Amino acid sequence: MDLGLTGKKVLVTGGSRGIGFETALAFAREGAEVVLASRDAESLARASEKIHAETGTQCEVFAGDLGIQEDRDRLAGAHSDIDILVNNAGAIPGGGLADISMARWHEAWALKVFGYIHLSQLYLAQMKERQSGVIVNIIGMGGRAVRPDYICGAAGNAALIGFTNALGAETPSYGVRVFGINPSPTLTDRVVGLYKSRAASKFGDESRWKELLDESTMPFGRLKKPEEVGALAAMLCSPSVEYLSGTVIDMDGGGQWG
């Protein structure tokens, strides 16, 4: 199926690995022109090489700390002609309220919460002028099915869900769509790190993290793959789904109801 994304300019933040990389790869397979943004220049180079080897698409890359406003401004200045923005950068730490310092709260929210909001603000202005564009926020089920041992993420993701709902209700009036995806735990290095934090909080020993991860109890008997999130993001950015806005899709295999 041709998703109608050929030639579209797509910016994926946190695009060097995990869900971000697989999302960028999904767009490249559809003929989109992809920009990868992340902190580490070497990781970006490796990701770009992998995508080029598989699809023939040569990605542009941007190395910067998107938790800093100046770097977000620099990104928007360097890559202004974006049709689709995928906000994906940011890993909020696990732990209960007593486990996370206020400095860590500020650091995590600066990248994910305020990073998403600010980049949306920067790129929405350009999309509004063109009367077209899509913003996708990769958020997380932690904001929907809240947990006390992921309190920083529960609060941050819940804020982004509300932000996406509100912004996506406004933007269709000028031809722009905004929606979100809430992935449940996905088979990435970041999720392993999160489970280690939970194990440290619960058992006092992060090495026991596998005790908290019983795949036999999960939907379909497994963790979700990052490429499944990327495939959904690309599909929903297709012009054939242009009535979708203001919605945040829970991609948890029905786990919240089980």
Image (tube, rainbow, N blue to C red):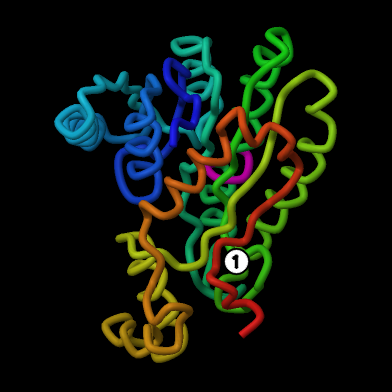
Residue at position x 64%, y 55% in the image: 249
Whether 208 is drawn above or below 245: the answer is: below
Q: Residue 234: horizontal and vertical position, in percent?
A: 48, 38
Quarter of the image that includes the N terminus: top left
Q: Is residue 114 magenta?
A: yes
Q: Residue 231: horizontal and vertical position, in percent?
A: 43, 46
Whether 201 is drawn above or below 100: the answer is: below
Whether 65 is drawn above or below 251: the answer is: above
The answer to which image quadrant residue 53 occupies is top left
| Closer-to-camera residue (62/233) | 233
Q: Secondary structure at mark 1?
A: helix
| Closer-to-camera residue (79/70) | 79
Residue at position x 52%, y 48% in the image: 107
Say left or right for 176 vs 111.
right
The number of numbered badges drawn on the structure is 1
> Which residue is label 1 attached to?
142
Of all residues, the one furthest to the front in this rendering is 1
Categorize mark 1 by other alpha carbons within 10 Å: few (<14), some (14-19), many (20+): many
Say left or right for 73 vs 24.
right
Quarter of the image that includes the C terminus: bottom right
Q: Is residue 130 magenta?
A: no
Q: Which residues are magenta?
A: 111-115
The answer to which image quadrant residue 144 occupies is bottom right
Q: Residue 103: horizontal and vertical position, in percent?
A: 54, 53
Q: Residue 133: horizontal and vertical position, in percent?
A: 63, 22
Label 1 is placed on what type of residue? Gly
Residue at position x 55%, y 47% in the image: 138
Main SS, magenta residues: helix
